[in-house]
Image (cartoon, helix red, strand yellow):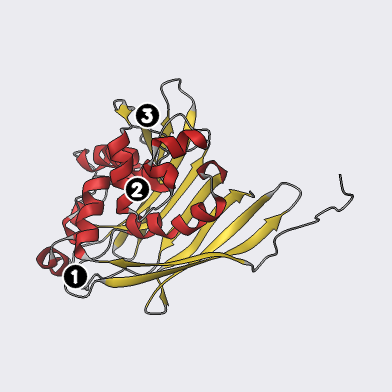
């Protein structure tokens, strides 16, 4: 045994993961099938226009679902995730031809070393505009 | 059609048991761009100490969706699906969902607020396993857009 004691491995502001995802209309159809959310605004331009939306939107839950992936990969164990919340602040419009690119950066927003827990804040952007607000993952530190 | 403010406090019947299937977990995992081996490989999941494939954190929405179906299907709810936009979502986990779980969920409408022409409906679904143990609570804020 060494008498070296690691006081902390992490600091608030540390980036723990980042990732980028390309969404296409195919991604939306795939997610609709997987999740059971068949709201037509996620695959029909005419219905999206009819209800006054700027275009076919990605399911908020798809964005939320992929945004947490880099954090889970960093943790290496899903049971370390104790909570996850997001606010859907800006709709993610998915162009029928070009799709859309979503970038995720995960940083430590709050740290409780004694409890061994942290709040991981996600910055999720499309064309440098944030699409999720208050996106927070509560974790037990690995 | 307007959202019925009397939905607040309404507690729905527990949903029928939902059996979490391996292929459903794999399908969902791919749909949310997971490359985590425990979501896709039974061997990897078992090596990590789980009984079977582990579902990604947002998988609980699949079970919650059944409860939201109950809400939308309520004759006096006044909620039109194409007018619904997801405002906020929260999950509080006791443990991850794994393949083989038999889950039931119970919906409770905790708040209905009017904001401009829109209605904000907060729906809380408590998901439990076959032992009745808490697995996850999923809370959705639905924005029901007024006539557009």
What residue lies at 32% left-to-right and 35% top-to-bottom?
B22
Q: Is residue B144 left or right of residue A103?
A: left
> Is circle 1 on the same chain as circle 2?
no
Residue B29 tag number: 2
What residue lies at 70% left-to-right and 61% top-to-bottom?
A10
Q: Are marks 3 and 2 in contact (CB under 8 Å)?
A: no
* Residue that badge 3 annotates: B103
* Residue that badge 1 annotates: A52
The answer to which quarter of the image holds residue B118 is bottom left
What residue lies at 20% left-to-right and 67% top-to-bottom?
A56
Q: Is residue A14 above or below residue A28?
A: below
| Pointer 2 local density, CA inside 10 Å: few below 14, some 14–19, many at least 20 | many
Q: Is residue A42 left or right of residue A19?
A: left
Q: CA distance from mark 1 to mark 3?
A: 37 Å
Q: Which element carries disc 2, helix, strand or loop?
A: helix
Residue B123 image position (x, y, % from top left): 38, 44
Residue A82 image position (x, y, % from top left): 55, 44
Q: CA distance from mark 3 to mark 2?
A: 18 Å
- Residue B123 visible, this orientation: no
What is the chain identity of the residue bearing mark 3?
B
| Pointer 1 local density, CA inside 10 Å: few below 14, some 14–19, many at least 20 | few
Q: Are marks 1 and 3 in contact (CB under 8 Å)?
A: no
Locate the N terminus of chain A by quadrant: top right
Q: Nearest the camera: A139 or A56?
A: A139
The answer to which quarter of the image holds residue B8 is top left
What residue lies at 50% left-to-right and 44% top-to-bottom?
A78
What is the chain identity of the residue bearing mark 2?
B
Instruction: Farthest residue to the right: give it.
Output: A3
């Amino acid at each position: 045994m060494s008498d070296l004691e690691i006081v902390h491995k992490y600091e608030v502001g540390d980036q723990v993961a980042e990732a980028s995802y390309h969404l296409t209309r195919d991604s939306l159809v795939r997610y609709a099938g997987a999740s059971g959310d068949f709201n037509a605004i996620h695959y029909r331009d005419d219905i999206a226009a009819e209800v006054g939306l700027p275009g076919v939107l990605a399911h908020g839950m798809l964005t939320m679902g992929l945004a947490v992936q880099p954090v889970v990969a960093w943790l290496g164990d899903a049971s370390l995730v104790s909570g996850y919340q997001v606010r859907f602040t800006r709709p993610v419009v998915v162009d029928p031809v070009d799709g859309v690119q979503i970038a995720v950066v995960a940083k430590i927003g709050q740290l409780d070393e004694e409890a061994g827990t942290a709040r991981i804040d996600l910055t999720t952007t499309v064309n440098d505009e944030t699409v999720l607000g208050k996106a927070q993952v509560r974790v037990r530190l690995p | 059609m307007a959202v019925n403010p009397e939905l607040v406090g309404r507690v729905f019947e527990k949903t029928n048991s939902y059996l979490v299937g391996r292929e459903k977990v794999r399908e969902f995992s791919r749909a949310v761009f997971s490359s985590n081996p425990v979501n896709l490989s039974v061997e990897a999941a078992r090596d990590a100490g789980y009984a079977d494939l582990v579902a990604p954190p947002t998988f609980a929405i699949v079970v919650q969706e059944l409860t939201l179906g109950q809400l939308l299907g309520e004759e006096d709810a006044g909620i039109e699906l194409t007018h619904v936009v997801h405002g906020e979502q929260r999950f509080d986990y006791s443990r991850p969902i794994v393949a083989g779980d038999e889950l039931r969920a119970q919906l409770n409408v905790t708040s209905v607020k009017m904001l401009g022409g829109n209605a904000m409906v907060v729906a809380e679904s408590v998901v439990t396993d076959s032992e009745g143990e808490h697995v996850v609570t999923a809370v959705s804020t639905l924005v029901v857009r007024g006539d557009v």
